[in-house]
């Protein structure tokens, strides 16, 4: 009869290492989803003491510090944006939310508002961060 030696016990317990890896994974997933959509366009939203929290469906437009307009991850000039606004569903006019960088020129914001108003959008709001 042949004697079979018992296998050696592992010196490393991998369970705590796997736990730490999963906790780090969960942390980074949660941290990345907590960033606002404005972080995609590298927009620094201004802060204000007073504001209103609303939870509606919005069409989100972004203005960066170089006065470039973004909608659904594409940049547009004025004529391109007019075409996009004309193609949007005219029946249910959604509210518009503008994310403008605090270094954006005022004239660019007014130009975007004019384009939106001429396309029939009347409910336009701005996004601000709470001043704490």
Image: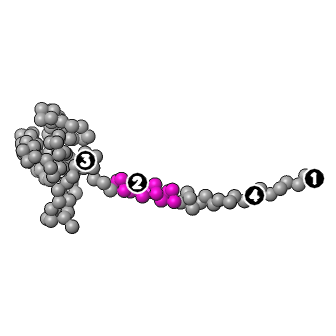
Tags 2 and 3 touching, CB below 8 Å: no
Residue furthest bottom as drawn: 132
Q: Specify few, some or many for label 2: CA neighbours under 10 Å numbering under 14, 14-19, or 20 or more.
A: few
Distance of mark 2 from mark 4, alpha carbons? 38 Å
Q: Give the mark nearer the N terminus: 3 vs 4.
A: 4
Seen at 13% across and 47% down, the residue is 104
Towards the viewer: 25 or 85:
25
Q: Is residue 26 left or right of residue 54?
A: right
Seen at 10% across and 46% down, the residue is 105
- State the residue position of label 1: 1
- State the residue position of label 4: 8
In this orientation, does residue 70 appear? yes
- State the residue position of label 3: 42
Towards the viewer: 88 or 40:
40
Towards the viewer: 14 or 57:
14
SS label for mark 3: loop
Residue 86, above or below 21? above
Q: Main secondary structure of the magenta part?
A: helix
- State the residue position of label 2: 29
Q: Which residues are magenta?
A: 20-33
Q: Nearer the viewer, mark 2 or mark 3?
A: 3
Residue 37, image x and y in percent?
27, 49
Q: Give the mark nearer the N terminus: 1 vs 3.
A: 1
């Amino acid at each position: 009869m042949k004697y079979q030696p018992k296998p050696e016990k592992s010196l490393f317990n991998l369970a705590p290492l796997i736990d730490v890896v999963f906790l780090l994974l969960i942390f980074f997933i949660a941290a990345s989803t907590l960033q606002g959509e404005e972080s995609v366009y590298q927009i620094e939203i201004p802060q204000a003491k007073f504001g209103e929290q609303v939870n509606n469906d919005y069409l989100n437009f972004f203005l960066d510090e170089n006065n470039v307009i973004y909608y659904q991850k594409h940049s547009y000039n004025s004529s391109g944006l007019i075409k996009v606004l004309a193609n949007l569903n005219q029946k249910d006019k959604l509210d518009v939310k503008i994310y403008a960088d605090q270094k954006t020129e005022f004239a660019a914001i007014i130009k975007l508002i004019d384009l939106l108003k001429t396309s029939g959008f009347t409910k336009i709001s701005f996004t601000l961060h709470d001043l704490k």
